[in-house]
Image: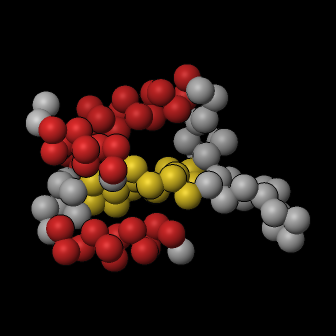
């Protein structure tokens, strides 16, 4: 694995935990935003490992947490817009 891929893996994971606040309804799940610099197909093994590890820790997609995926498809200039989209 190249160093850049390794850094992108961990640097590309953006966790935006939206825990329940006093004015919010408790039914809203926390959201994890995951964005990669390439395509989804090139990250299949990584995203599967990520979801498996979350499951081991008790976080199940669509039950206890929502995972939102975004892909730059090699267009690095899109990264700021993708990150902003996940934060909103």
**Percent position of residue 14, x then y:** 44, 55
**Percent position of residue 61, x then y:** 55, 42
Residue 26 vertical position relative to residue 53 in the rendered view, above or below: below
**Percent position of residue 64, x then y:** 66, 42
Which residue is located at x 24 percent, y 73 percent?
78
Q: Residue furthest right?
A: 22
Task: Tally the numbered discs.
Answer: 0
Q: Quadrant of the N terminus?
A: top left
Choose top left, top right, bottom left or bottom right for residue 60: top right
Which residue is located at x 47 percent, y 27 percent?
53
| Left or right: 24, with 58 as reference point | right
**Percent position of residue 82, x then y:** 35, 70
Which residue is located at x 16 percent, y 45 percent?
4
Q: How is the image coloured?
A: secondary structure
Residue 66 vertical position relative to residue 3 in the rendered view, above or below: below
Which residue is located at x 43 percent, y 73 percent?
85
Choose top left, top right, bottom left or bottom right for residue 63: top right
Choose top left, top right, bottom left or bottom right for residue 6: top left
């Amino acid at each position: 694995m190249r160093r850049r891929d390794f850094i992108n893996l961990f640097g590309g994971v953006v966790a935006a935990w939206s825990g329940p606040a006093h004015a919010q309804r408790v039914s809203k799940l926390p959201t994890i935003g995951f964005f990669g610099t390439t395509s989804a197909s090139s990250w299949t093994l990584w995203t599967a490992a990520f979801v498996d590890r979350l499951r081991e820790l008790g976080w199940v997609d669509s039950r206890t947490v929502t995972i939102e995926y975004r892909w730059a498809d090699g267009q690095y200039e899109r990264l700021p817009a993708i990150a902003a989209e996940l934060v909103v």
